[in-house]
Image (spheres, helix red, strand yellow):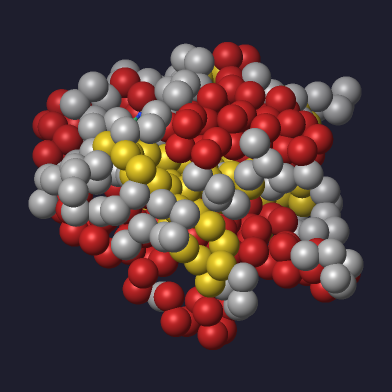
Amino acid sequence: MREVKLVFVGFGNAGQGCARHLLKNRSFLRERRGFAYKVVGIADTLKGSVQNEQGIDLSKALELVAKGKKLDGDDLPGKKGLSSPETIKSSGGDVVVEATWTNLKDGEPGLSHIVTALESGLDVVTSNKGPIALCYRRLVDLAKSKGRQLRFESTVMSGTPVFNLYEYCLTGVTVTGLKGILNGTDNYILTEMAAGKNYDETLKRAQQLGYAEVEPSGDVEGYDPTAKITILANAMMNANVKFGDVVREGITHITIDEIRKAEQASKRIKLLASAMRDQEGRVTASVKPTLIPETDLLAHVSGVMNALQISTDVQPDVTIMGPGAGGDSAGYGLLNDILSINRGAQHHRYLTPGKQ
Ligand SMILES: NC(=O)c1ccc[n+]([C@@H]2O[C@H](COP(=O)([O-])OP(=O)(O)OC[C@H]3O[C@@H](n4cnc5c(N)ncnc54)[C@H](OP(=O)(O)O)[C@@H]3O)[C@@H](O)[C@H]2O)c1
C-alpha cells in the first residue's frame, strides 16, 4: 500500500490533535480504511521545523512538544530550520495539513501556505478559517486548475462533519438556506445568562475554561461565526458572499432582561448565523442575536454545542449538532479530510488503472 506523505504546518492544538488520531488509529486506518501514511515535514514558528523523507517519528514529535522541547533539536533526525513555505515546497509531501492561526484581516500566513502547497502540486486540508473565509473562490479555482484537493472540514463546527455531510449525503439536493449556532463561546455565554449569570462574570468564566480568548472580540462581536457562515454559504450554496458584506452583530449588548422577556414569549435568544437566497438569486448572510421559538430545535442547543440546519429543495431541514471546538475535534476534522482525499485517490486509481 502506498504511504501518503503528510506535511504539518502549524503544530498547535489542532495539528497535534490530528497527529494523535493518526498515531492511535494507525492499524485501523491501514486495515479498514486502506490508508497508510508517513509524516515528512513539520513546521511551526516557535517549536521549529523538521523535514525527513524517510519519515518523522510522530510519537516522538508529540512527546517533545508536550515537554516544551523544540522539534529542531537533536531528538529528531532530518533537515532543520526551514521556513514553512520551504518545508511545503521541498518536503516531497502529498498532503499539507495547514493548522496555523486564523487571521480574518488578510488570511496570512495560512493563505500563503495553501497557495504554495497547491501551486507545488500538493493537496491541502486546513482548519484555518481565515484563508477560506476571505479567498474561497480564488483558492478553489487554484486547486481545480492544479488538479488538487482543498478541504476545510474543521473550519466550521470543528470535527462535526458538516462539509462531509453535504458532499457525501446531500449530493443530489440544492441548498436553499442555512441557519446555525456556530460559536460555542457565544452560545455558552447566552446559556449562562439565561441561567441568571451576568455577562461580565460569564465571559470571565468562559476565559478561565479556555472557551474564550483573552481578547474575546472575535467571538462576542461575531467575527468568528461571520467567517463560518461566509464559508458555508460559498461552499454549500455556490454563492459569492464576501466576509465584509455579512451583516454582523455580536452579543455584547444583550441583557438578562431581554433574555427573560424572550422566555416569557416562549422564545430563546441565540446568536444565529444564517444565509439565504433572495428572489433575484443572490445569497445574503447575517450573524445576529435572534429570537428563536422554543419549538425550534436550535432553541435547545446549549452551552458550547454548535448546530447547523441545512434547508434544501428536497429535504426541508437537515440538522446536525456537535462540538464546535477543541484540539481533538479539530484534529478529527483534519483526519476526516485526509481520508476523503485518500478515498478520492483510490477511486481515481480504480478508474484509470495503471496510471499510478
Ligand atoms: N482548537 C480548536 O478548537 C479549533 C477548532 C476549529 C478550528 N481551529 C482552527 O485551527 C487553527 C489552529 O488552531 P489551534 O487551536 O491549533 O491554534 P494553536 O494551538 O495556536 O496552533 C497554531 C500553531 O500555528 C503555529 N504557527 C503560527 N504561524 C505559523 C507559521 N507561519 N508557520 C508555521 N506555524 C505557525 C503556532 O506556532 P507557535 O505557537 O509556535 O507560534 C501554533 O503552534 C486555527 O486557525 C483555528 O482557528 C481550531
Residue 232: in sight, yes or no?
yes
Q: Which of the pair 72/233 is nearer the observer?
A: 72
Residue 297: in sight, yes or no?
no
Q: Where residue 352 sits: x, y (%)?
A: 88, 67
Q: Which of the pair 79/338 is nearer the observer?
A: 79
- The residue at 37%/39% (across/down) is 43
- The residue at 68%/41% (across/down) is 121
Q: Which of the pair 210/260 is nearer the observer?
A: 210
The quadrant of the rendering that contains the C terminus is: bottom right
The quadrant of the rendering that contains the N terminus is: bottom right
Left or right: 220, with 336 as reference point:
left
* Ligand 1 quadrant assignment: top left
Q: Where residue 278 sits: x, y (%)?
A: 80, 27
Q: Where residue 177 sits: x, y (%)?
A: 71, 41
Q: Could you say which quadrant of the image residue 276 lies in? A: top right
- The residue at 56%/48% (across/down) is 92
